[in-house]
């Protein structure tokens, strides 16, 4: 099978031939349907995001079960599924015990430590497999991972900081439902209308927020995607005074939440200025290198700058639930599907940011 691999630090990605994986005890092999190009994959290509080579990259994946290893039961061949990205953690540290496995110092992840989804087949532990709800397509499911990251950022990191006693995660665990309601009646500004930004915007809307999307003139195609998802409030920061436009769109109200998803220094600067005194900015975009920021703004306005990294077990469950309910739509974000042999052109297109999500599909 063809697989896109990081062979060594300092080397570009290489498309190589590998034998198809065989399921060991407790493992499942998926025939890959499609795998999305993530911003972190671009950073991996540039040696700005660490992996353990040689490794097949790609972690936004969906497929069907083709084989299971010894000890795996209740998972039929042909089951449509996606895979959580955390492969293993220590299971003992305070973070693991609190369910924050994304932050375990011993975390190993798909496409970074273990061969990932830019291939024809991928092998993962049984516990990673999440069967898809009936109404969720395989194309849509390839975006479960970025959606889970956005659920974690918006519902578990951002909204929880302002929620009433009993976090969204705790309430959802007890009620078996969605952690909604923490943002009802609030204003959420999302800077950067790429796939992550538009997923964050949909999650914030599902949690009850009124959403404003910020972007540049280069983002006009992505504004069109946002309109197709039902959003109506936009600011082109290169054509409008964003600090006047945002309050005007909201009748003079200041944003309760600001999400920086562009991974660009000017965007972060804007987000800090837009946040009200005592407000919170969620940083979910990656920069890949140090960026200049007016940190004094954090102090003078007593702003909370909250980072959000990867996903948690609970955010995956919520992500699939949101898709099944139709409260978040991921398939409209897929603007092209390309064969894995065209990965280099696809990566270049992802860097130009004119598209939504680009999926790579295996060779037939």
Image (tube, rainbow, N blue to C red):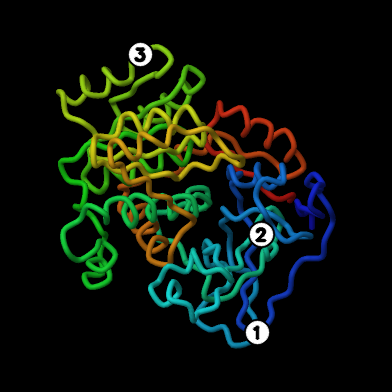
Q: Is residue 161 left or right of residue 103?
A: left
Residue at 35% over, 29% down:
213
- Tell us which disc is closer to us: 1 or 3: 3
Residue nearest the observer in this picture, 218 or 238: 238
Quarter of the image where one finds residue 106: bottom right
Name the secondary structure under disc 2: loop
Closer-to-camera residue (141/286): 286
Front label number (1 vs 2): 2
Between discs 3 and 2, the one toward the N terminus:
2
Query: Left of 220 or right of it: where is 107?
Result: right
Q: Which residue lies under the disc numbered 3?
A: 240
Give the residue at x 58% y 42%.
Answer: 39
Q: Which mark is residue 25?
A: 1
Q: Are marks 3 and 2 in contact (CB under 8 Å)?
A: no
Precedes in sequence: disc 1 or disc 3? 1
Residue 115's x, y, as percent?
Answer: 70, 63
Q: Disc 2 designates what residue?
A: 112
Q: Looking at the image, which residue is at 48% across and 50% down?
A: 146
Foreground of the two, 42 or 63:
42
Give the mark nearest the N terminus, 1 or 2.
1
Work out which residue is located at the far top of the displayed protein and give it: 239
Q: Marks 1 and 3, Cα distance to the nearest angstrom?
A: 58 Å
The image position of residue 142, as x and y in percent, is: 53, 51
Q: How far apart are the alpha carbons under marks 1 and 2?
A: 22 Å
Quadrant position of residue 273: top left
The furthest residue to the right: 17
The residue under the point 47% across, 17% down is 217
Residue 260 in the image: above or below residue 32: above
């Amino acid at each position: 099978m063809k697989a896109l691999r990081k062979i060594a630090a300092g080397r570009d990605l290489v498309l190589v031939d590998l034998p198809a994986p065989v399921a060991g005890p407790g493992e499942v092999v998926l025939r890959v349907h499609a795998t999305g190009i993530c911003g972190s994959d671009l950073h991996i290509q540039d040696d700005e995001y660490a992996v353990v080579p040689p490794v097949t990259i790609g972690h936004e994946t969906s497929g069907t079960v083709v084989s299971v290893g010894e000890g795996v039961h209740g998972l039929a061949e042909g089951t449509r599924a996606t895979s959580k990205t955390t492969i293993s953690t220590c299971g003992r540290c305070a973070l693991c015990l609190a369910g924050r496995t994304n932050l375990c110092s011993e975390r190993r992840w798909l496409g970074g430590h273990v061969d990932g989804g830019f291939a024809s087949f991928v092998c993962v532990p049984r516990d990673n497999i999440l069967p898809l709800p009936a109404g969720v397509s395989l194309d849509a499911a390839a975006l479960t991972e970025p959606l889970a990251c956005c659920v974690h950022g918006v519902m578990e990191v951002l909204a929880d900081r302002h929620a009433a006693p009993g976090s969204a995660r705790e309430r959802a665990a007890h009620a078996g439902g969605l952690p909604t309601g923490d943002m009802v009646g609030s204003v959420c500004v999302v800077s950067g209308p790429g796939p992550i930004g538009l997923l964050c915007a949909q999650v914030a809307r599902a949690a009850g927020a009124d959403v404003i999307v910020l972007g540049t003139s280069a983002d006009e195609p992505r504004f069109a995607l946002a309109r197709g998802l039902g959003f109506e409030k936009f600011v082109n920061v290169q054509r409008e005074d964003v600090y006047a436009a945002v309050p005007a769109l909201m009748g003079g109200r200041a944003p309760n939440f600001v999400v920086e998803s562009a991974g660009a220094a000017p965007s972060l600067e804007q987000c800090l200025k837009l946040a009200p005194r005592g407000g919170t900015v969620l940083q979910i975009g990656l920069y890949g290198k140090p960026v200049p920021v007016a940190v004094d703004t954090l102090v003078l306005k007593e702003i909370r700058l909250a980072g959000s990294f990867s996903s948690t077990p609970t955010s995956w469950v919520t992500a699939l639930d949101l898709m099944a309910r139709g409260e978040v739509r991921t398939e409209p974000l897929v603007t092209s599907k390309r064969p894995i042999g065209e990965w280099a052109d696809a990566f270049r297109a992802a860097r130009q940011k004119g598209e939504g999500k680009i999926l790579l599909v295996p060779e037939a």
